[in-house]
Image (cartoon, rainbow, N blue to C red):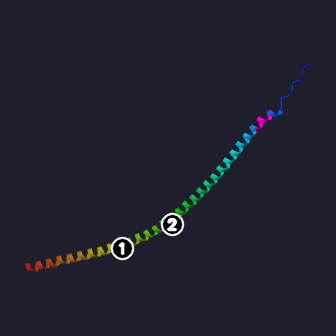
Amino acid sequence: MAEPPQPPAPAPASAPKLAGFEQLDARIKELTSSQGELLDRIQRLKLDVQNWRSNLETKVKTSQNELLELKKGLSSEVELLKSEMKEIRSTIQEEKGSLQHQFADSEKSDDTTRTTTEY
């Protein structure tokens, strides 16, 4: 009579399975480590962007305030120049009127001198 076939030995079959699990476990640890590094890097980049944005907003506010002050200064300078130009125009008109009056008087005196000397 023949003996029944013996089942395969469990030890050799479990060794390759354990080695596969060890490789898988090592790969999972590597991926987890890489994931942690990426998350840390993302957090640092996020903080860098927040700091950059905050600095930029501060610079924009400062620039806006400086521009507002310059605008106010220029506005007052323009008003002062307008006032001075009005005064200059007024003075020129007065001088023009005075010169026209003097010219008319000198023409009258010339005419009077001519008519008296002609007779």
- In the figure, is residue 88 to the left or right of 10? left
Name the kind of residue labelled 1 in the image: Glu
The answer to which of marks 1 and 2 sits earlier in the sequence is 2
In the image, residue 106 above or below residue 53: below
The secondary structure making up most of the magenta span is helix
Q: Amino acid at mark 2?
A: Asn
74 vs 36, nearest the viewer: 36
Q: Secondary structure at mark 2?
A: helix
Q: Quadrant of the N terminus?
A: top right
Q: Which residue is mark 2?
A: 65
Q: In front: 60, or 20?
A: 20
| Vertical side of 110 occupied by 36: above or below | above
Residue at the extreme top: 1
Residue 101 placed where, x, y %?
23, 77
At a point 78% along the width and 36% down the height, the residue shown is 15
Give the magenta-colored segment's residue range: 13-18
Residue 94, numbered circle: none
- When asked about the image quadrant of residue 97, the answer is bottom left
17 in magenta? yes
Q: Residue at x 68, y 50 (%)?
A: 36
Residue 87 spot, x, y in % from top left: 34, 75
Which residue is denoted by mark 1 in the rendering? 84
Could you say which is closer to the camera, residue 101 or residue 77? Answer: 77
Q: Nearer the observer, disc 1 or disc 2? A: 2
Q: Position of residue 81 (x, y in %)?
A: 38, 71
